Image (cartoon, rainbow, N blue to C red):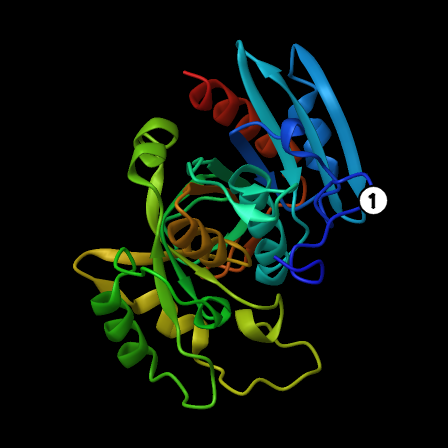
Amino acid sequence: MQASELILTPEGAVYHLRILPHQLAHKVILVGDQARVSMISKHFSRIECQVQNREICTHTGWYNGVRISAVSTGMGTDNIDIVVNELDALVNIDFHSRSICEKHTQLELVRLGTSGALQPGIAIGDFVASEWGVGIDGLLNFYAGDKSSFNDEMNAAFMKHMNWPASWADTYIAPANKDLMDKLAPGLIRGITATAPGFYGPQGRQLRGQLFRDDLNELLMTFNYNGTRVVNFEMETSALFGLSALLGHKALTICVAIANRATGEFMGDYHQRMEDLVVHCLDHFTL
């Protein structure tokens, strides 16, 4: 791989994360906000390394005798593209020879975040686990590979229901990992998570900018595929699920519902619920 494709620092670290292969655990908790990395690592019994570059912060340490990395991604599927590709490179590319390793290493990637609920029955503060990520961001359209785990039938039904504009990128629907879902999300609200490439217009919010479509959220709320509904809106899950599936990693997202777009509610102080979600994840992830 040429230097312009696999970009490394002079120290041999991967370019954006700024960490070396031995500094990454195979269990990784992903958060958008860099401040949440220390919210996770404060529970570690021992911290091995702490590295920061731009909005990407990595802490690797131990919890319940299990090695874990906490990594911030920043907001959006574009950042997920960077972080997931570089996490994969750290374990599946030999940086010395710049070649793909003969043996594949699988990562377990769990995203913890905040989201807006899209069903009136979801209470503010509830934990919502994403079974599927429907990407209205278009990122996975740039990738080839085995997409057999993607749900093309559900996606076709979704695009038809939404009367999807031809000028918008085709959607895709990628799955969460069932093993991680069973391990970390027993009893939680489950469904489809809609992933948008922005916070305002792409999520049907109008301030001063006029929307191209004013029925986006109404149609999302009413989509139903064999009993599976769109439960929340956020900005990272579809890319995480899609790239993980293509690269051979396990992925799951669990979010706190801090707003309900159906009822207009918003949770002003959600930090304790994030703390609760962090502890829930650490305890279940290390079983």
Answer with the quarter of the image where residue 190 lies. Answer: top left
> In front: 263, or 142?
142
Name the residue at 74% across, 48% down.
Answer: 8
Q: Quadrant of the N terminus?
A: bottom right
User: Farthest bottom residue?
Assistant: 166
Name the residue at 29% across, 39% down.
Answer: 178
Name the residue at 34% across, 36% down.
Answer: 181
Residue 9 at x, y = what percent?
79, 46
Q: Is residue 252 visible?
A: yes
Q: Quadrant of the C terminus?
A: top left
> In front: 35, or 272?
35
Residue 63 at x, y = what percent?
57, 14
As drawn, is 240 to the left or to the right of 15?
Answer: left
> In front: 282, or 231?
282
Q: Which residue is mark 1?
A: 10
Residue 21 at x, y = what percent?
64, 33
Relative to 21, residue 218 above or below: below
As drawn, is 130 to the left or to the right of 263?
Answer: left
- Identify the secondary structure beneath mark 1: loop
Name the residue at 29% across, 72% down.
Answer: 158
Relative to 128, residue 211 above or below: below
Residue 114 at x, y = what percent?
57, 46
Q: Amino acid under label 1?
A: Pro
Answer with the quarter of the image where residue 165 lies. Answer: bottom left
